[in-house]
Amino acid sequence: MLAPAHGLRTQSYAPRRQCHGTMNADGWGVGFYPAVTAEPARWRSNRPLWADASFASVAPVISARCVLAAVRSATAGMPADETAVAPFQSGRWLASHNGVIDRGLLGPHPAAESVCDSAQLAAHLFAFGPERLGEFVVGVGKRDPGARLNLLVTDGRRVLATRWTDSLSVLRADDGVVVASEPYDDDPRWQDVPDYHLLEVDGEVITMTGLEAP
């Protein structure tokens, strides 16, 4: 999040591949799976990541086997409090959304953490079944052809992500696998995920599957 030249801290004010908007200054969040708890821990804020000195001092001593982090560029009219910031949680599952969706086509979900579009979308996904992410995104895309549906979910072991009209890349690094909206450095091993594809990471196995475009 902080150390790479183009990590999330830099992407919060100077993203390189962002297709919509120019900054991500409306908050940040991280969920991580420490060895001592069954469910993930979360730290979320509605402040810009670059302005959070407390997290910068604590992050170097946090250890986890799986991490999901996000910075936020809020959709116009959406709430600005930290409950609208990813990652969203249901039990062991965490989810983030890079995009926009017509909330009226989803309908409100009572388990959503916020009334914002991303939180509502995550709640519907948790109810549908996060392990069926590809099927869920295809269905939502048919109902809202203008939606941008880059979604990422994890239970701490598997990572599932969709590229749906925005950027997505994957890196098999020396110590694990990284899935990101844009590469955090210039390592030549980064691979772009094709549009309208589902990415699955299960251990060392990386699979990409084409999805039915709207």
Image (spheres, helix red, strand yellow):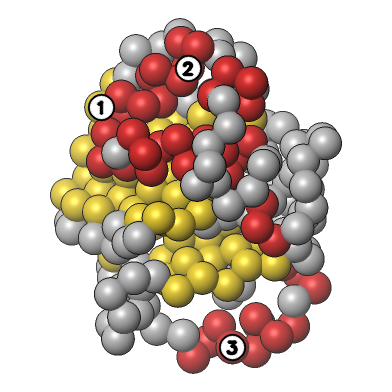
Q: Determine crowd level at label 1: few under 14, some 14-19, many 20+ residues with C-alpha closer than 10 A.
A: few
Amino acid found under the numbered disc labelled 3: Val
Q: Which residue is mark 3?
A: 58
Q: Residue at x 22, y 38 (%)?
A: 207
Q: Earlier in the sequence, mark 3 or mark 1?
A: 3
Decide which of 57, 113 is in the foreground and name it.
113
Name the residue rendered at 45%, 35% in the picture: 124
Residue density around tag 3, few if under 14, some if 14–19, many if 20 or more, within 10 Å: few
Kindly identify which numbered label has been placed on residue 141.
2
Secondary structure state at the residue bearing disc 3? helix
- Separation of marks 2 and 1 at Cα, in angstroms: 16 Å
Disc 2, SS: helix
**Residue 209 versus residue 173 in the image, above or below:** above
Please give the name of the residue rendered at 18% of the width and 58% of the height, measured from the top-left corner.
203
Q: Quadrant of the N terminus?
A: bottom right
Marks 3, 1: nearer the viewer = 3
Residue at which label 1 appears: 209
Question: Within 10 angstroms of label 2, few (less than 14), some, or many (20 or more) residues?
Answer: some
Q: CA distance from mark 2 to mark 3?
A: 39 Å
Label located before the other in sequence (2 or 3): 3
* Relative image position of residue 30 (x, y in whole percent): 53, 66
Identify which residue is drawn at 82% across, 35% down: 76
Residue 85, given in percent of the width and then of the height, sits at: 64, 55
Q: Nearer the viewer, residue 122 or 8?
A: 122
97 to 214, vertically: above or below: below
In whole angstroms, how far apart are the C-alphas of marks 3 and 1?
37 Å
Name the image quarter holding residue 152: top left
Q: Is residue 12 left or right of residue 144?
A: right
Q: Is residue 147 left or right of residue 174?
A: right
